[in-house]
Amino acid sequence: MTASRIFLTTSFVLFTNLIIIFSFHFDFIPQVYFLGFRLNLFLLLNLILIFLYYKKLTIEHLLPFKTFGKFKHWFAAFSIPVVITGIVIGAAYIFGEVKVPKLKYFYEFGMTSLLDFPMYFVWTLPFIFSMIYIWFIVLDTPNYFSKVINSILISLSFSGFYIYNYDKVEISEYVIYFLLTSSVVLFNYSFFKWSRSLWAASFSIFMIIFSFVLIFGSSNEFLIRTFFARNYEKWEGFFSLYLIKNMPAESGLIPLLIILSIIFFNLRRGTDIKK
C-alpha cells in the first residue's frame, strides 16, 4: 500500500469515527437536508480526502462515472439483496426461529419505504458516491487477500457506533456487524469490478442497506434518517429472526456476501481473459 493510500485509509477511519463519537457525545445527527438530499459531515470528509489524495481531479478520475451499466448490472444490484435476505429468512425458518412482530409504524414507515425507495436512492447518491469512491481506492490492490484485509480496515471506520455504546452492546453482536460491514464492502467492490459502473455499484450498496434494514431492523438513528424517512429513529424490522443457537439472522448474510464476492471477481477475470 502506497503512502498516499495509507494516509487516505488512516484518515478515513480516524475522522469518520471522530464524527460518530462527537455526534453521540453532543447528541446530534451530523446531517442537514436540502431538497431531500442527505448532506452530512461524512460527505464533506470524503470529498476533502478524495481531493487530498488526487490533489487535482482529471477526466481519468471521473471515468467510472461515465459507465452507467447494463440492464444485467442493475438487475443484479436489485435482485441479489432480495434473494440473499430471502435465503436467510428461509434458513431461520428451517433451523431457527421466525416471528412477525407487531410493528408500530408498519404502514407509515415500512410500506411507504417500499414506495419511496427510488427517492431515497436519489437523495443519498452524493453520500454513497463519495463513500464507495474511497472504498474502491483503498481496495484497488492486486490480490484478493489484500482486498480482504483492506475491507476489514474500512469496516473499522464504523466502530464508533459500537465503541461509544460498548456497555450496551454484546461483543458477539459487535463482531457480527463488524464482519457484516467488511463483507458488504468487499462484495460491492467485486460488484464494481464486474459492472465497471459506479452508478450500478451505488445502487447495489443502497439496495443492500435498504433491504437489510427493512427486513432485519436497526436502532442506528443515522442509518435510518439517511436511507429512510428522516422523522424516525429506529425500525424493528419486518421479521424477528434467529438462526442456530440464537445467532442473529444477519450473521447468515456474511458467508453469502463473501461467496458472491468471489463469484464476481471470477466473472471479471473471465471477461478480461476473453478480451
Image (tube, helix red, strand yellow):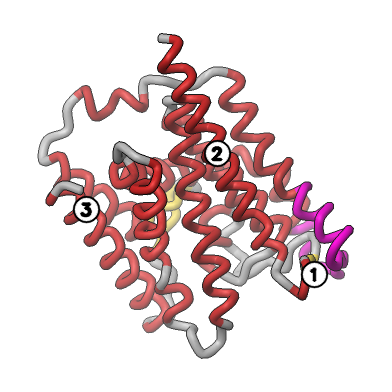
**The disc labelled 2 sits on which kind of residue?**
Ser
The residue carrying pointer 1 sits among few (fewer than 14), some (14 to 19) or many (20 or more) residues within 10 Å by Cα, namely few
Q: Position of residue 208 (x, y in %)?
A: 60, 47
Q: Give the label, 1 or 2, closer to the camera.
A: 2
Sequence-first tag of 3 and 1: 3
| Residue at mark 2 | 204
Q: Position of residue 10 (x, y in %)?
A: 23, 61
Residue drawn 50% across and 58% down? 181
- Secondary structure category for the residue under label 3: helix
- Secondary structure category for the residue under label 1: loop
Q: Quadrant of residue 20?
A: bottom left
- Secondary structure category for the residue under label 2: helix
Q: In the figure, is residue 224 to the left or right of 28?
A: right
Query: Would you place residue 197 above or below residue 9 in this image?
Result: above
**The disc labelled 1 sits on which kind of residue?**
Lys
Q: Position of residue 185 (x, y in %)?
A: 46, 49
- What is the distance, in whole Å, between disc 1 and disc 2 at their CAs? 29 Å
Sequence-first tag of 2 and 3: 3
Along the viewing direction, whichever of 70 and 88 lies nearer the viewer:
88
Sequence-first tag of 1 and 2: 1
Residue drawn 80% across and 55% down? 89
Residue drawn 84% across and 52% down? 90
| Residue at mark 3 | 8
Q: In the figure, is residue 225 to the left or right of 55?
A: right
Give the magenta-colored segment's residue range. 86-108
